[in-house]
Amino acid sequence: MAAVKFPQNGVAAGELNKMLQDLKSGDMAWRDARAFSMVFRAGEDVSRVVADALAAYVFENGLSPFAFPSLLRMETEVVAMTADLLHGGENAAGNMTSGGTESIMMAAKAARDYAREKKPGIKEPELVMLRSAHPAFNKAAHFLGLKTVIVPVSDASEVDLAEYRSAFSPNTVFAMGSAFSYPHGIIDPIAEMAAIAAGKGVWFHVDSCVGGFILPFVEKLGYPIPPFDFRVPGVTSMSADVHKYGYVSKGASVVLYRDVELRKYQLFVYADWSGGVYATPCISGARPGGPVAASWAVMKYLGYEGYLRLAAEAMKATQLLMEGISRINGLYIIGSPKATTFGVGSKSLNVYAIGDKMKQRGWHIDSQHLPPSLHFTVSPMHLKVVDTCLKDLQETAQEVSAMKPEDVSGDAAIYGMIGSLPDRAQAKDITTQYFNDLYKTG
C-alpha cells in the first residue's frame, strides 16, 4: 500500500471513534476469554478501576518525582506491597518499570555494574541462563555487553543441576532461574540454583514476571509450590509483572532487590548536563503515570483476599483444562507445571495445525517450539469457557489426526518450517526479514 501521509485536516471525534472500533474488529477476541496470552483479565469491576486510574493520570509524567509526588508515593507503595508479597524484608527496594523486559534489563545492569565495582578484573562478563528463560535475558545481554552461557533443559523443561553448575566461570556476574517459566509454567529449582550462584559469589535473579502475582496465592491455597522468592538464601533480585496476574493494563512491572544498597547499581545519573542533573531509575526517561496509578488502585481494590479468590478460580480452570487435555488422544502436558501456565505437546499430531484450526474457531493459542507445543496461560475468566475449549480441542485434534503432511498450510506450515530448521542462524535471518517486512510503512 502507499505510505500514509500526514493528515492535512483533522477528523471529528465521533468519526475517529468509529475508525478505532473498525480497526479493532480484526484483533483477537480477548474479552470473551478465548485468548490464552497477551491479556490478563479479572472482570469488569477490576477493568473499571484500571480505566479510572489511567484516566486520572493520563498525562502525568513519572520522570519528575518532585512535580508529581503522588506518583512517587504510589510507586513506592506498589514496590513495598510487591516486596511484602514476595517476602522481601525491611531492606528490600526496587522500582516500577514498563514491563518484564525492562525489569530484567535493570536487574542485569545492576548485576553488571555491581561486578564492575566489586570484581574489576572481569573484562568479559557472562550471564548464565536456561534455554527456557525468557528472551528478555538475551536482549539484556545484547544491550549490556554480556556473554550468554545457555544451559539446556530437557523436553520436560527440567535442568540438570550439574550442567548448571558447570556453566559458571570466573567471568560469571549474573545468573537466573524462572518461577515460573513462560513457555511451560515450570518452576526451576530455585533453592538449589541460588545456592550454586551464592557459592560462587554470583548475583542470582528470579524471573517471576508471570508467577510473581499468582504463586504466593496459589501457595496460600494449599498447592505444593516450592520456595522461589526472597525466602530463599542467595536470591539477589526478582522481577514480577503487575500487568499479568496483577490484572493491570500493560506497562506495569516491578524489579526488586534484597537490599536497598543493591538498587543503586540500577540507577543512571548524569550530573553535567546543561539542563541540570539528570537521574532516572529505569531505561525510560519520561514514564507514563497511568500504569503506576492503575497498579496502586487495583492492589488496593482487590487486596489479598481478592487476589486469593481470583487465584482459586484460575487454578480451578487450569486443572480442568489440563485434566481434559490429558484425556485427548495424542496430546500431553509438558513437564510438571505447578500453577496457571502450561504447554501442550504431541508425539503424533501437528500441534501447529491444531492451533490453526482453533484459531478458525475463534481461539488465540500461541505456538511454541523446542519442543513443538501450544501455550496456555489461564486467567480467572477462562473458568467459564473450559468445556467449550476442551470440546473444540478434541474436535480439532481429531481433524488433524486425519490430515496428511501436505495438507498442512498457513501459519502451521510456516512456524513448523522455522522451528525445524537445523541452522538456527537461518531461522533467525528468516524471522528478521519477516518482521522487517511486517512493519513496513509503505
Image: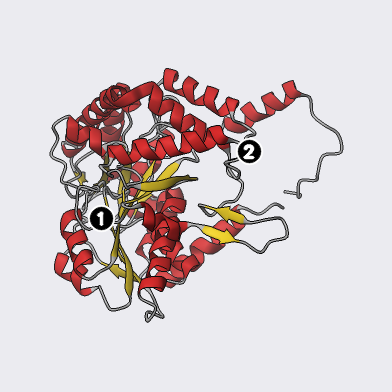
Picture quadrant where residue 426 is located? bottom left
Between 178 and 364, the residue placed more toward the observer is: 178
Can you tell which mark lies on residue 136?
none
Secondary structure beneath dot 2 equals loop
Give the percent coordinates (x, y) of residue 322.
Answer: 20, 36
Can you tell which mark lies on residue 67?
2
Between 370 and 330, the residue placed more toward the observer is: 370
Residue 210 as seen in the image, left or right of residue 281: left
Q: Is residue 29 visible?
A: no
Furthest toward the right, the residue is 8
Give the percent coordinates (x, y) of residue 413.
Answer: 41, 54
Q: Is residue 114 above or below residue 393?
A: below
Say which residue appears at 17% left-offset and 39% top-offset.
326
Picture quadrant where residue 123 is located? bottom left
Secondary structure beneath dot 1 equals loop
Give the percent coordinates (x, y) of residue 263.
Answer: 41, 55
**Mark 2 vs mark 1, CA separation in Å:** 35 Å
Picture quadrant where residue 164 is located? bottom left
Name the amino acid, label 1.
Val
Name the amino acid, label 2.
Ala
The count of marks equals 2
Residue 432 as seen in the image, left or right of residue 237: right
Between 328 and 248, the residue placed more toward the observer is: 248
**On the image, numbered disc 1 is attached to which residue?**
235
Say which residue appears at 57% left-offset and 51% top-offset.
284
